[in-house]
Amino acid sequence: MKRRLFAFMVLFALALAVTACASATEGEESPTPAPVTPADIVLPPTETAAAPSPAPATATATGTAAAAARSGTSLSVAHNDWFATAGTCIVCHQFLIDSTGRDVSPANYWRASMMANAARDPYYLASVSSELVISPQYAEAIENKCSICHMPMAHFTDEWQGEKSVMFGEDGYLSPDHPLYPLARDGVSCAVCHQIPPNEEEEKNSGNLAFDMESPPGQRLIYGPFAVGPRGQNIMSSSSGFVPTQSDHMNTSALCATCHELYIHYIGEDGEISENVFPEQTPYSEWLHSDYAGQQNCQDCHMEVAEGSAPLSSMMPGRAVSPFYVHTFTGSNVFMLNLLDTFGEEIGVEADSQHFQDAVARTLDNLQNNTASLSILAPRQEDGRLIFDVQVQNLAGHKLPTSFPSRRAWLHVTVTDANGEVVFESGSATPDGRIIGNDNDDDPTRYEPHYDVITSADQVQIYENIMQTEGGQVTTSQMLAAGYVKDNRLLPTGFDKATADPFIAPQGAAALDDDFIGGADTVTYEIEVGEAAAPLTVSVELVYQSISYRWVQNLLQYNTEAIHTFNTYYQASSNLPTRIVQQEVQVP
């Protein structure tokens, strides 16, 4: 361990040489720098701040890092022979400026992402704890499976050393006294994604990260999309233990599928773990079955591209590359980003409020400009009825919504008369996130069906996947889910229902709906308006919610510390949906 710490001190010393080597070529020899202390190292600023921040916390001899300040000025520094936290990587990968003068350093953006906070997410922790209560006999299997992609550095360290993955309790990764605590809390860090090797024989999924755990420090390959010359390789391998290696697989969707294509062996009616699997999330397969496959990869939508070019390292700022992918990892979870910001002090995030609000702004922009469009078609009045079609188009390269099945999107439709009085409304929501008229929110044993035609206010078109047990009961427990009784999530363009694998094919009435096709769904509204004063105004919005009301209510039935913690945050937050897109027309 002392030898490894000395190597990192060498890295710190090299940081002082940035100015001296700025004009050096790849083949030139670097001058010997004077030694510096960790206090001389600064972290990247937020997107809006220009001043550098104080130094990161220094790892102790056991690898435990000091707790990060809420100001977001510190990233934990910890490492072992296989992994390192992002705080160790920023020393050379900070102050990376693109052609417009924007700082695109990876940690600036990653630190407020759901990737960085994968192990801090209070809803994730509460959900895992509920599964342990529901199926305590399979606690080992549950904690093992749920730590693979959310706490991978800790999980694979223990797995390689023949130890079990334990998340909760005094001996769990979430205990500050656990030696792997800082690695676990760093979530999906730099040394995770960049150590996933190319898929040589078959596509990797369900956390099959296939790390090389055998190569010793100094010989461990770490992958990137650009070639690094001998000088850069020597600097990085001697200071960090990783050898930078160019590989095109870093720009492929298959890389993301490693964790974002998840199949779970569920618990059957007999109480035993089935040999069959439940498709918990399948965005990669959905993408493969769309027109986007071979045209756009996950990175193209979920990571921004820097303007012009940017350097890979502050050690060689004169060597810029393009395209430089900014590590935004933009998704759709506005609710959780706001929660992490609001309760960051208690949760222990390593990003300040500006980082999170920047992430929220990017997420809203993505949702409202790149996700979906809608049209109100052929509105007309016939015999006291208002008739119109609503067509929703999915602009994403996978189902909308996709991934974790607590997510849902729905149509909120309002018709008002000339006096502003509401004549009809379908899909309104209460502040706690309940959809008025939704069978599943009112009754955990039922669910709202898919509609081709809507005629009453208690009918709501909700795009969602409803899980069911092997015996056919509606459930929100992932370990008990054997499949979906309903899956009418909007399909990506080019998705063929007839040829789709059963794991990703629509389930329920959507499978038989001729208007529910690849890229779009059309719903007809036939509403009794009587003698309502004209003109009538039809307003339609597609809204989104990352944690459905029913999922929260089912979770709160169980008594665990993680659930109590999440509920405290949840009750202090608004779970109103996020608007994706809205249209409005008047009918004479």
Image (tube, helix red, strand yellow):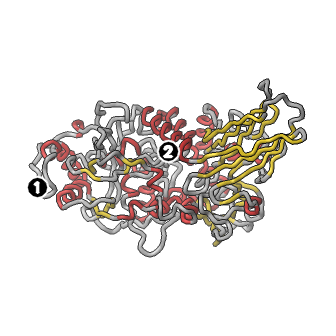
Q: Which residue is drawn at the image coordinates 40% and 60% (left, top)?
A: 251
Specify the amino acid type for callout 2: Arg
Residue at the farthest top position: 419
Label placed on residue 28: 1
Q: Nearer the viewer, residue 249 or 588?
A: 588
* Up-down relation of residue 112 to residue 521 (above or below): above
Where in the figure is residue 308, as x and y percent of width and height? 31, 47
Specify the quadrant that holds the C terminus.
Answer: top right
Cα separation between marks 2 and 1: 43 Å
Determine the residue positioned at 68% across, 38% down.
433
Q: How many marks?
A: 2
Q: Is residue 232 above or below residue 571?
A: below
Residue 184 shows in this picture: yes
Residue 210 in the figure: left or right of residue 81: right
Q: In the rendered structure, which disc, 2 or 1, sits on the residue that comes first in sequence? A: 1
Q: Badges 2 and 1: C-beta atoms under 8 Å apart?
A: no
* SS category of the residue bearing label 2: loop
In the rendered view, would you say 293 is above or below 345? Answer: below
- Residue 152 pos. (x, y %): 45, 57
Q: Viewer-nearest of labels 2 and 1?
A: 1
Residue at point 79% right, 45% down? 525
* Residue type at the position of mark 1: Glu
Q: Quadrant of the N terminus?
A: bottom left
* Secondary structure type for disc 1: loop
Q: Residue furthest front?
A: 588
| Disc 2 target residue | 120
- Alpha-carbon neighbours of circle 1 within 10 Å: few (<14), some, or many (≥20)? few
Residue at coordinates 46% horizontally, 36% vertically from top-left? Answer: 356
